[in-house]
Image (spheres, coloured by chain):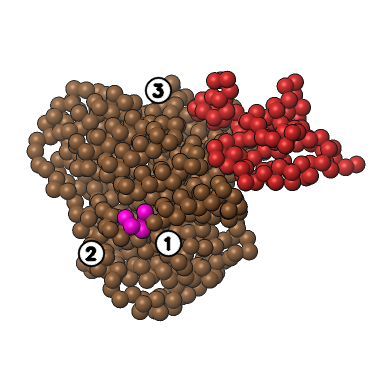
Chain colours: A brown, B red
Amino acid sequence: MYKYNEFDEAFLAERNAQFRAQVERRIDGSLTEEEFRPLRLMNGVYLQLHAYMLRVAIPYGTLNPDQMRALALLAEKWDRGYGHFTTRQNIQYNWPKLRDLPDMLDALGEVGLHAIQTSGNTIRNTTADHFAGAAAEEVTDPRPYAELIRQWSTDHPEFQFLGRKFKIAITGSNTDRAVIKAHDVGLQVVEQDGQIGFKVIVGGGLGRTPMIGKTLREFLPQADLLPYLESVLTVYNVLGRRDNKYKARIKITVSENGIDTYRAMTEEAFLTIRGQYDGTDQQLLEEIKAHFTAPEFRSGSTEAFDTAYENDPVFRAWADTNLDQHRAEGHAIATISIKAHGATPGDASAEQIRVMADLAEQYGYGELRISHQQNVILPHVHKSDLPAIHAKLKEHGLATANLGLISDIIACPGMDYCNLATARSIPVAQEIATRFDELKLEHDIGHLQIKISGCINACGHHHVGHIGILGLDRAGVENYQITLGGDASENAAIGTRTGPGFAYDEIVPAVERIVDTYLAVRESAEETFIETYRRVGMDPFKAALYPEAAKKVA
Amino acid sequence: MARAFTPKVITANDLLEGDVIYFTAQDTWTRHMSEAELITDEAVAPLRLLEAEKQNIKIVGAYLADAKAGPNGPEPTHFREEFRRTGPSNYFHGKQEAQANV
């Protein structure tokens, strides 16, 4: 894992000192809110419905145990005892006070974390596959490149006032767990003729105009990463619209000008920009790579795992849903669900955060990951340790066996916290999870992703949910639109609206009717929801959702 | 005929605490919507907002929010203002908690 050097530490300390002074100047009246606002946003400080909110970046979703404990400390000392993991590998604190924020940032700085560029029209936290460095099928660990991007983009003078925010995601696998096609730039590490490089995807995004990214370059040699990204950004900075906020994202720039024009302009800029790079970035990359050397995976018997798997049905259920194949023999990737039925998706208490930090330290080679799906991962675990891990998780409400199932819901904070929201999303998620737990149908339903956003900005990724739910304000009342057939994987697809929306008290029954329809029309228990939807299309679901309309047609 | 004016309260967030506050008829700020000034005259509303904004050194983002008269003072007419007045629905945090502790 990357460890800050003296330069990084000095940079962050100075930046935090600047922010502390800015806060003081706001409080003593030297700065107006109009002047202060962009300064606080650049340091991750929002003002939400009930309080300030601090958004902390978890670069490429990777944390060590000390960093994880620092997150618990912030929750306990300056917040309400919990943190909220977001869909962009950030953690948010919902209740900080203005005067405490500089202290919170200093505490983060001590463990090499920050909130820089978690807001504003800048290059945001680069997100990565949460199984990076562990997945069996990976070409190579993408995180050194993500760290290189972090260092290059942090405080980059040309990209502090972009037309709009800019999000980059990276994966090293063919299996896309980072939703790279729904980002401004998506990078996939690929190998061609023995050379490592990137497939570059541009112009994806959700929000009010959802789009699947287009391929800008099939193969970019790894040494050209930064000059090429700089070219993409430079073209966007010049070509991107600034007359209309809603037309300012790169997806609109690409779609209005065409991918071929965008490519030609990028390649032209690249000819100049590449010459400005003298190889220093590649030296830096080599230094960064040294930090990401894989741990020395131990060998040994996995008998303890096998015994528990055979004899303990609770452990077996957890192992079946929450474990993934690791690249090292005898190891597994263990995902800790922080979505117990009825809990707020993404929330973890300070105590739970500490328990997960301790488990990573004791059993997990000192590594943790946060997924955009709002769960926590122990990426490297020897199988023989899994029964002990599971036992500890159970004690702290962290052993829910629901990964990829209907209660493993992504939900944005919605109108319970967010200033931009038009409806609530958290209670909808809570009620869906509780309902299907009561019905004891979850495991029978199988793989099904529900994603909920409380406004059109789509932080809850509803467009790419198998079932997407969008909360809106219709004439002063909460109303929920449903989309079906979205897909967040390498087969990325935008869901299709079913029809008119549903009132708050109708949305959970509506989801139930969709699921009942799926169970009735699927060919076998092996056919997943999304496979069934692709086979039968929208009609049976529409008929179940809008029986009155069906009657009229008949 | 012109549409009838919906009464308003002035609301903002406190600079230091960040929590929701309301402007009173005495030009002070309160944590309770019920103690806010209910502005029923359309011509007066922008003037009162200007008065509130004079205190921008200690408040953030004052605006006029729709409200109605209730038995105990002004009440929200829209669910967003109801949440701001109460707190989130997933935890007993925010104003609902503060009021329970009175």
Q: Which dot, 2 or 1, sits closer to the camera?
A: 1
Q: Is residue A297 above or below residue A80?
A: below
Callout 2: SS: helix
Residue closer to the observer: A310 or A150: A150
Residue under the image location 76 percent in, 41 percent down: B48
Task: Please report, as a chain letter, where disc 3 is located.
Answer: A
Question: Residue shown at 83%/38% (left/top)?
Answer: B41
Q: State whether the magenta stretch is mostly helix, strand or loop.
A: helix
Alpha carbons under labels 3 and 1: distance apart: 50 Å
User: Mark 2 and mark 1, same subunit?
Assistant: yes
Q: Is residue A546 visible?
A: no
Upstream in sequence: badge 2 or badge 1 = 1
Q: Are marks 3 and 1 on the same chain?
A: yes
Task: Rate crowding at label 3 as few (under 14), some (14 to 19) or many (20 or more) other CA atoms within 10 Å.
Answer: few
The quadrant of the picture occupied by the C terminus of chain A is: top right
The amino acid beneath tag 1 is Asp
Front residue of A272/A194: it is A272
Q: Chain of mark 1?
A: A
Q: Which residues are magenta?
A: A9-13
* Residue at image location 43% in from the left, 71% down from the top: A231
Q: What's the residue type where badge 2 is placed?
A: Glu
Q: Give amino acid for label 3.
A: Lys
- Residue A327 percent across, percent down from the top left: 20, 47
Q: What residue is disc 3 on? A: A440
Name the residue tied to disc 1: A155
Residue occupying image coordinates x 57% and y 20%: B102
Residue identifier under label 2: A286
| Mark 2 vs 3, N-terminal side | 2
Q: CA distance from mark 2 to mark 3?
A: 51 Å
